[in-house]
Image (cartoon, rainbow, N blue to C red):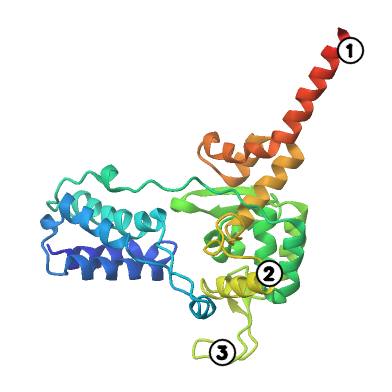
């Protein structure tokens, strides 16, 4: 089996069903070009993987026209991007070839090739930023963005949500999450008030938009259709820029991504309740260790408690 055959088969069986198929397709095209479609699968060794990682680390992020005119230098892609676009998809292909297709593959020390990534950044939207976002965001994109803030769900969980996943009587929403994990979250009063008026716009999908021009796959102009994976990010980026909020490429600390709305939900609930376990359950983390990234939010409460104890001790003495 050649690498071209293996990568194509992996795409047909698994890759196209992943969260970001277009991104994965681009990753596979890059790997096929670098490795060679006719290269035997057994020839993909540790040395080849090391070369691919080194090559990918030299790539840079695309510059906007404004940055190019300003003479800014292009930034190198992050270690996380290298891991996600090279090492991880290559590992999935070889693992499936060995375990599902009974093909011979070289023994790869994947841990050796994974680059150290920057610590997870916890960035929440301020109330002022939230107000500016909704001020500039087109009205029909308000529901999915507000749902993200209220529920803490991920982008792919929101964009694929269907009406039969909502149990109005039991007040629960089934979430088809990361890694094909299925769980549920409460249908709170605020979520119910948001979702109930959307019923009837589409028979299957919850979040829709209205194309402004007739297309081949749209029966009539101004008819709501399921929201696509590209149009919400497109309007999010336009809105973020209009609201004067940088993106994470421009400023890793101050930049605001759509995924940061999930951090916003967690931070606000933890600040209101002080309950890490509650946040863990809402975000559906498999381990409380993942949720502890938000623990710094409780610093003010901990500091106040320390001061209270110190005050009592001083009064007693």
Which structural element holds mark 1?
Answer: helix
Q: Which mark is residue 219?
A: 3
Q: Quadrant of the C terminus?
A: top right
Which structural element holds mark 3?
Answer: loop
Q: Residues within 10 Å of mark 3 (few under 14, many from 20)?
A: few
The image position of residue 212, as x and y in percent, is: 62, 89
Q: Residues within 10 Å of mark 1 (few under 14, many from 20)?
A: few
The image position of residue 182, as x and y in percent, is: 51, 50
Quarter-wise, where is residue 213 in the image?
bottom right
Quarter-wise, where is residue 145 in the image?
bottom right
The image position of residue 6, as x and y in percent, is: 20, 63
- Is the Cβ of the residue at disc 1 closer than 8 Å to that at disc 3? no
For the point 53% across and 90% down, the residue is: 215
Q: Which mark is residue 315?
A: 1
**Mark toward the viewer: 1 or 3:** 1
Relative to residue 243, is residue 311 drawn left or right?
Answer: right
Q: Is residue 73 above or below residue 317?
A: below
């Amino acid at each position: 089996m050649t690498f071209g055959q293996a990568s194509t088969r992996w795409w047909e069986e698994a890759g196209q069903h992943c969260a970001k198929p277009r991104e994965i397709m681009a990753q596979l095209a890059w790997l096929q070009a670098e490795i060679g479609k006719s290269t035997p699968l057994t020839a993909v060794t540790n040395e080849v993987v090391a070369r691919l990682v080194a090559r990918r680390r030299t790539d840079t992020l695309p510059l906007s026209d404004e940055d190019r005119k300003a003479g800014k230098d292009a930034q190198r892609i992050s270690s996380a991007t290298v891991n996600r676009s090279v090492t991880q998809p290559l590992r999935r292909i070889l693992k499936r070839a060995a375990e599902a297709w009974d093909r011979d593959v070289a023994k790869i020390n994947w841990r050796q090739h994974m680059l150290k990534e920057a610590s997870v950044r916890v960035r929440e939207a301020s109330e002022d930023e939230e107000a500016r976002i909704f001020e500039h965001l087109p009205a029909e994109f308000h529901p999915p963005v507000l749902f993200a803030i209220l529920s803490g769900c991920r982008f792919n969980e929101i964009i694929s949500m269907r009406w039969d996943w909502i149990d109005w009587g039991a007040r629960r929403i089934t979430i088809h999450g990361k890694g094909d994990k299925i769980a549920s979250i409460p249908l709170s009063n605020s979520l119910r008030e948001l979702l109930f008026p959307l019923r009837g716009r589409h028979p299957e999908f919850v979040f829709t938009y209205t194309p402004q021009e007739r297309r081949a796959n749209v029966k009539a102009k101004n008819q709501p259709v399921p929201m696509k994976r590209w149009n919400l990010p497109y309007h999010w980026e336009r809105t973020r820029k209009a609201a004067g909020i940088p993106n994470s490429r421009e400023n890793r600390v101050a930049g605001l991504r759509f995924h940061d709305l999930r951090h916003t939900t967690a931070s606000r609930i933890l600040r209101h309740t002080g309950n890490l376990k509650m946040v863990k359950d809402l975000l559906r983390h498999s381990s409380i260790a993942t949720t502890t990234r938000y623990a710094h939010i409780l610093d003010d409460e901990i500091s106040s408690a320390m001061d209270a104890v110190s005050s009592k001790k001083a009064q007693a003495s």
